Amino acid sequence: MDKPIPKEILDRIVWNEKFNKHERRVEEFKPTCSICEDCGLSLDETRIVNCKRSGNQTAHPHFKSQCSVCKLYKHPETKKYDSTFYEVESHWRSIYKKAFFAAKRAARDK
């Protein structure tokens, strides 16, 4: 190696001691612990947010985001990961029901 390993990375490496000093091998790389910005849980791995398109594709399509750490969904109004799947679904259903009946009333009143 031409360059030395930076200290912040070197502190996170666990070396396999079976080999001599010139042939050391990395056994494990310790993750950095951080705090999730949304749910506040301690993370020891990379946080992943799964986004998928849901709902009837023609009547009421929408996106749902789920945190892989706390397994909660992002609420469309509060923008926080504090809702379950069913709470997000009922929120979207109520919005689309209101829009559907408002359109029906508008067509009937013409």
Image (cartoon, rainbow, N blue to C red):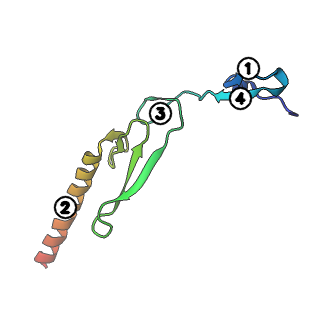
The amino acid sitting under disc 2 is Lys
Closer to the camera: disc 3 or disc 2? Answer: 3
Closer to the camera: disc 1 or disc 3? Answer: 1
Q: Which of pointers 4 and 2 lies earlier in the amino acid sequence? A: 4
Q: Which of pointers 3 and 2 lies earlier in the amino acid sequence? A: 3
Horizontally, residue 71 falls left or right of residue 86, namely right
Residue bearing the label numbered 4: 26
Q: Which of pointers 1 and 3 lies earlier in the amino acid sequence? A: 1
In the image, what residue occupies the spot 33% across and 49% down?
76
Give the Cα distance between marks 2 and 1: 65 Å
Give the Cα distance between marks 4 and 2: 57 Å
In the image, what residue occupies the spot 74% across and 28% down?
25
Residue bearing the label numbered 2: 97
Depth check: give the residue in front, 76 or 22: 22
Give the Cα distance between marks 3 and 2: 34 Å
Closer to the camera: disc 4 or disc 2? Answer: 4
Give the Cα distance between marks 1 and 3: 34 Å
- Dot 3: few (<14), some (14–19), or many (≥20) neighbours within 10 Å? some
Instruction: Describe the element under mark 1 as helix, strand or loop.
Output: loop
Residue bearing the label numbered 1: 17
Q: Are marks 1 and 3 in contact (CB under 8 Å)?
A: no
Return the x and y of residue 91 as percentages of the image width and height. 25, 51
